[in-house]
């Protein structure tokens, strides 16, 4: 159950920071999807979340 809450929280954060992430190059990787449903855009950043997870894991390994 905890992993589901973490995933949903990360999903909300990614959607909120979408414009900033696209400026630094994330969000346009193969595996990042943008869905259009009922006039709204839903951003699903699968590849970007993997990249950020690896960066966080590398930083965590040093501490």
Image (spheres, rainbow, N blue to C red):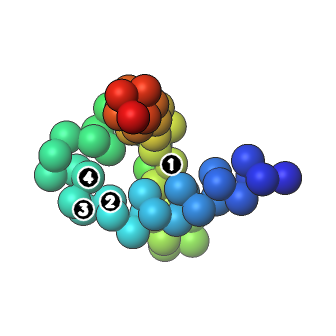
Which circle marks residue 44 in the picture? 1
Please name the residue that numbered disc 2 is placed on.
18
Picture residue at 22% right of the left edge, 50% below the top = 22
Is 19 left or right of 23, judged from the image as shown? right
Of pointers 1 and 2, the one earlier in the residue sequence? 2
Instruction: Give the distance between the C-alpha atoms of the residues marked 2 and 3, in whole angstroms.
Output: 4 Å
Instruction: Give the distance between the C-alpha atoms of the residues marked 3 and 4, in whole angstroms.
Output: 6 Å
Please name the residue that numbered disc 4 is placed on.
21
Q: Is residue 34 above or below residue 57?
A: below
Instruction: Give the distance between the C-alpha atoms of the residues marked 1 and 3, in whole angstroms.
Output: 14 Å
Q: Residue furthest right?
A: 1
- Which quadrant does the C terminus fall into? top left
Instruction: Give the distance between the C-alpha atoms of the residues marked 4 and 1, in whole angstroms.
Output: 13 Å
Picture residue at 43% right of the left edge, 57% below the top = 14
Please name the residue that numbered disc 3 is placed on.
19
Q: Position of residue 20 (x, y in %)?
A: 22, 60
**Which corner quadrant of the image does residue 28 belong to?**
top left
Instruction: Assess whether mark 4 and mark 3 are in contact (beta carbons under 8 angstroms).
Output: yes
């Amino acid at each position: 159950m905890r992993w589901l809450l973490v995933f949903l929280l990360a999903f909300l954060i990614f959607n909120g920071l979408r414009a900033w992430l696209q400026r630094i190059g994330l969000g346009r990787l193969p595996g990042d999807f943008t869905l259009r449903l009922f006039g709204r855009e839903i951003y699903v950043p699968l590849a970007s979340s993997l990249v950020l997870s690896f960066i966080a894991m590398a930083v965590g390994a040093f501490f």
